[in-house]
């Protein structure tokens, strides 16, 4: 039996009204069929069936219930709906209908064991090829049918490392005998447990690690939305487990506060530029050959960018600045912050006078600072006073992003992945493609302090330096 | 769908070639760089040569028994040099098999050295030329290095690592085998038995209180007795304190002794080859080994590490398993996790020794209602048909859950018995499931069912 629920749509939703049934009681519905019209203070939406079967109305049109309130049921043929009608929201508060809506009734991807999966033949083929479990894929095609795009999206979103209890062809939950016994001992509902064993089956460890979903977080059936699917209300199974909650305190809290303040206070604008890195790649190779034997630190690509940015800032001092309430203060010294990712978050230690220091010193300094950051031994001095930051996501295969300015700076530059590109070379009047190494720089500026055109000029200076990198060694 | 990822595997041992094949199976383009020969330490210097040598020594010892009874007529000499030659041929065949499977899977194999230049590039030196390989993912599988231990009063030249034993033309007259390396393996027992069968007068000295670390202490007497019967002198809690030109002085559980040792064999002195590929240049963090999580990822998300180089158990079974997990994850960005909690061990000696999981002592504090049962393998039908040698099988069980926590066997068929237990434990079968199994008669596997049944009857 699957309850049809008033879904919780957003944190502030207090209650929802079933405006109109879209299917009569007793009719057959498929997954994804619109079932009823819902109205809340803020929006109106059609609520879809999350399983297939016979729809039974539980309440009259116009009934208002708390989120999670049961308005009806989807049942197999010949099964009678429960007698007790759900209580309207007007009933004593606190008596949330969470009792009648067990947390497992949820999102589109959470099918019941044995439920028929509607998928296109191509989707099935793609699912087999990618090793995606169709039972875990939300369908967006007609009538909730799973399309090959859905499968590809589900694959991209993560491996099929089971997100909820895996079921076999017959709809039985796949679980090892020991895991089953342990779940019985502990009174754990296996349908809520994520399986990580062979073929995604539930093993002892999964039951041991299981943390029950927090009550009151069950949401209703899937909601068709315009625009991207709202990640807002996770279904109970996918609700954050307590051990995964990352409190907004300490470093994480500071980052949250500063980044939000940064976006709230500044007028941030990001622009990107392609840089040909062929010469920089060659230069690094050469430096490795020449410097390695003498144990001179060979610069990383980020180090080269740090140096290029520092030199370019001399020509474009407007980007080496701080905005105060009264004025834009252009700074004399160039200190470049270099973002280092840690488990707990991000720290931005500072390379002092990067415009004056030789690149080998910068290389040594960034690796020393990165090590200190990992060890947690950075001093306050090492983390403050940066006049512009460089942040790299290249190692995560990111090409372009919109870095967020580190206040009180007025700009930050993002370093993308070094990748293969193509440029057209003209020989004897004919154009032919030549392989080239490329990288994208993403510059975010505070539009209050700098305009787009000078920012673009700055970025072009950085590019020029990186494309003729011998200048960085001077 | 996007282009296949390029995965570079550094090291062609069991972890590396396992990873390469797994990544290939997931559609990645794979390059494997091996410094020496495909197969790595396991195939070229450890498991396979040892196994091949023991496959001469063990039948020889069994034949001796029949010979004494006059059942067969056998000489009293094992030709060590011929065993070595046979071993070399078998190892070559294994190497070729691995090379062929890599070839057939269309894995590009380079014999050369690879070191990281940065997090996305390795520099490969092969046949005097250097080239750079840029890849989406890297798998570090550089294995372990033999470390000759420094022993007081003994020049380093007198101490040999296990790989050297396989390559000598004849067995030494006397030998001291130093068991258990940093990873607490028991391979020293294999070398002791091999040498004893080859006519060497062997002393086996182990640093801990047990000859076989990991094996339930109840079975220790069987091991001690069987090894003593081969003429092996055992010393536990032993430490080398000095030596002279042909002897070694050891302090051990029963005092101090000088033993004759023309050859000193450091059986499993290996240490993770952390720096072989300079992973620190890619920002990879190393501790005693390269640090990885259960998906085999290092702190750098697209760089993985598997096997001995990560420290831990430092056995091939673990490396292969990690390789399969890492290879698949590297190819598709997956989050598959290793399951190394139930890792079996096997010594192909006389007697066979094998175990998996916890000893009774290990498990004592962990579960409320611990049960164990031990049966005498000497009376199993299969053991009797094989000559009636002694043995025992012990099962350690959480009686509340019916979970088998450990299985330990010494004697006929121990490896086969533990293989059955391994399958049951990894599938998380209950002790009742195991008692309900049906096996061939007479077979070693029957003993597993029997000991499980005994535990149930007692409950």
Image (cartoon, coloured by chain):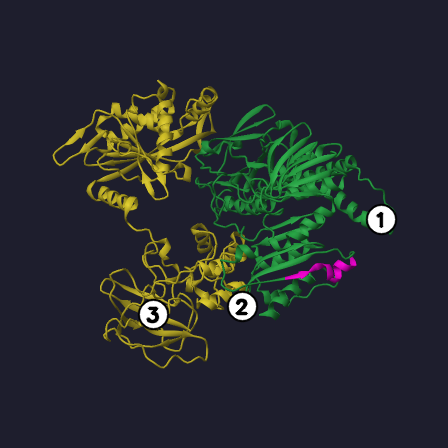
Chain colours: A yellow, B green
Disc nearest the viewer among 3 and 1: 1
Query: Foreground residue, A101 or B187?
Result: B187
Residue B379 inside the magenta-drawn segment? yes
Marks 2 and 3 share the same chain: yes
Pointer 1 residue = B67
Q: Are marks 2 and 3 in contact (CB under 8 Å)?
A: no
Q: What stretch is highlighted in magenta?
A: B374-385
For marks 2 and 3, the one nearer the N-term is 3
Q: Is mark 1 on a helix, strand or loop?
A: helix
Q: Mark 3 points at which residue?
A: A5
Majority secondary structure in the magenta region = helix
Quarter of the image where one finds residue B430: bottom right
Residue found at the far left of this picture: A326
Q: Quadrant of the C terminus of chain A?
A: top left
Which one is in front in this view, the residue at disc 1 or the one at disc 2? 1
Callout 2: SS: loop
Cα distance in 3D space between marks 2 and 3? 27 Å
Q: Is residue B458 magenta?
A: no
User: Residue at 70% across / 56% down in the picture?
Assistant: B391
Chain of residue at mark 2: A
Q: Tell which subunit mark 1 falls on.
A: B
Residue B248 point in image, percent of width and height: 65, 33
Residue A444 higher or lower than B317, as above or below: above
Question: Does any portion of residue B86 appear in the rendered image?
Answer: yes
> Residue A166 in the image: x percent, y percent?
49, 62
Disc sitting over residue A170 in the figure: 2
Q: Quadrant of the N terminus of chain A?
A: bottom left
Compared with A51, B348 (above or below) is above
């Amino acid at each position: 039996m699957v309850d049809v629920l008033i879904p919780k749509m957003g944190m502030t939703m207090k209650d929802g009204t079933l405006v109109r049934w879209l299917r009569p009681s007793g009719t057959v519905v498929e997954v994804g069929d619109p079932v009823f019209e819902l109205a809340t203070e803020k929006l109106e939406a059609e609520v879809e069936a999350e399983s297939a079967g016979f729809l039974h109305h539980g309440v009259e049109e116009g009934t208002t219930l708390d989120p999670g309130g049961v308005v009806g049921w989807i049942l197999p043929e010949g099964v009678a709906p429960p007698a007790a009608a759900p209580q309207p929201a007007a009933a004593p508060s606190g008596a949330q209908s969470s009792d009648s809506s067990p947390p497992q009734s949820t999102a589109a991807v959470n099918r019941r064991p044995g439920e028929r999966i509607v998928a296109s033949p191509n989707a099935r083929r793609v699912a087999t090829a990618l090793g995606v479990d169709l039972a875990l894929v939300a369908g967006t095609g007609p009538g909730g049918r799973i399309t090959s795009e859905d499968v590809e999206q589900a694959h991209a979103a993560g491996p099929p490392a089971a997100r909820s209890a895996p079921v076999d062809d017959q709809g039985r939950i796949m679980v090892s005998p020991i895991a089953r016994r342990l779940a019985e001992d502990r009174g754990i509902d296996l349908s809520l447990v994520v399986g990580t064993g062979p073929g995604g089956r539930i093993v002892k460890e999964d039951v041991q690690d299981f943390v029950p979903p927090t009550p009151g977080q069950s949401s209703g059936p899937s909601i068709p939305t315009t625009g991207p699917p709202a990640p807002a209300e996770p279904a109970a199974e996918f609700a954050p487990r307590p051990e995964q909650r990352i409190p907004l305190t300490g470093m994480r809290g500071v980052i949250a506060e500063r980044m939000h303040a940064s976006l709230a206070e500044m007028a941030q604008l990001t622009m990107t530029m392609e840089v040909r890195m062929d010469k920089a790649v060659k230069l690094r190779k050469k430096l490795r050959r020449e410097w390695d034997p003498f144990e001179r630190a060979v610069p990383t690509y980020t180090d080269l960018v740090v140096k290029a940015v520092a030199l370019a800032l001399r020509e474009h001092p407007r980007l080496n600045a701080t905005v105060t309430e009264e004025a834009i203060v252009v700074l004399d010294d160039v200190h470049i912050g270099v973002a280092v990712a840690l488990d707990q978050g991000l720290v931005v230690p500072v390379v002092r006078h990067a415009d004056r220091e030789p690149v080998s010193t910068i290389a040594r300094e960034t690796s020393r600072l990165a090590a200190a950051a990992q060890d947690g031994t950075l001093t306050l001095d090492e983390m403050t006073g940066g006049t512009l930051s460089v942040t790299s996501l290249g190692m995560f295969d990111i090409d372009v992003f919109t870095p967020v300015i580190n206040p009180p700076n007025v700009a930050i530059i993002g370093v993308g992945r070094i990748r293969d590109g193509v440029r057209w070379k003209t020989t004897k009047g004919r154009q032919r493609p030549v392989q080239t190494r490329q990288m994208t720089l993403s510059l975010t500026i505070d539009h209050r302090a700098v305009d787009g055109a000078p920012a673009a000029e700055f970025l072009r200076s950085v590019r020029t330096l990186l494309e003729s990198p011998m200048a960085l060694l001077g | 769908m996007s282009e296949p990822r390029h995965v570079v595997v550094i090291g062609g041992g069991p972890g590396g070639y396992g990873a390469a094949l797994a990544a290939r199976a997931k559609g990645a383009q794979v390059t494997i760089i091996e410094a020496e020969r495909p197969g790595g330490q396991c195939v070229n210097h450890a498991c396979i040569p040892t196994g091949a040598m023991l496959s001469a020594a063990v039948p020889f010892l069994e034949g001796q028994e029949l010979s004494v009874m006059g059942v067969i007529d056998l000489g009293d000499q094992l030709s060590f040099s011929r065993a070595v030659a046979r071993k070399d041929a078998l190892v070559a065949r294994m190497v070729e098999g691995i090379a062929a499977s890599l070839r057939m899977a269309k894995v590009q194999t380079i014999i050369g050295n690879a070191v990281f230049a940065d997090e996305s590039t390795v520099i490969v030196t092969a046949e005097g030329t250097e080239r750079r390989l840029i890849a989406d993912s890297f798998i570090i599988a550089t294995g372990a290095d033999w470390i000759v231990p420094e022993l007081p009063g003994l020049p380093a030249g007198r101490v040999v690592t296990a790989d050297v034993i396989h390559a000598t033309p004849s067995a030494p007259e006397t030998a001291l085998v130093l068991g258990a390396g940093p990873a607490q393996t028991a391979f020293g027992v294999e070398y002791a038995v091999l040498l004893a069968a080859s006519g060497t007068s062997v002393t086996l000295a182990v640093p801990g209180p047990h000859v076989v670390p990991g094996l339930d202490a109840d079975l220790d007497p069987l091991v001690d007795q069987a090894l003593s019967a081969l003429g092996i002198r055992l010393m536990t809690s032993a430490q080398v304190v000095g030596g002279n030109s042909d002897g070694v002085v050891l302090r051990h559980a029963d005092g101090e002794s000088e033993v004759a040792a023309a050859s000193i064999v450091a059986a499993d002195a290996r240490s993770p080859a952390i720096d072989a590929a300079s992973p620190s240049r890619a920002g990879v963090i190393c501790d005693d080994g390269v640090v990885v999580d259960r998906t085999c990822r290092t702190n750098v998300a697209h760089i993985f590490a598997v096997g001995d180089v990560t420290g831990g158990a430092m056995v091939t079974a673990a490396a292969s398993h990690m390789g399969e997990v890492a290879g698949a994850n590297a190819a598709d960005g997956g989050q598959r996790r290793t399951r190394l909690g139930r890792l079996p061990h096997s010594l192909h000696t006389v007697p066979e020794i094998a175990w998996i999981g916890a000893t009774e002592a290990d498990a004592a504090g962990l579960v409320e209602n611990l049960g164990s049962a031990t049966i005498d393998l000497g009376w199993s039908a299969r053991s009797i048909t094989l000559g009636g040698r002694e043995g025992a099988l012990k099962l350690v069980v959480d009686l509340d859950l019916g979970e088998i926590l450990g299985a330990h066997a010494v004697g006929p068929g121990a490896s086969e018995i533990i293989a059955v237990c391994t399958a049951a434990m990894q599938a998380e079968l209950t002790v009742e499931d195991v008692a309900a199994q049906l096996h061939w008669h007479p077979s070693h596997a029957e003993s597993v069912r029997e000991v499980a049944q005994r535990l149930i009857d007692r409950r």
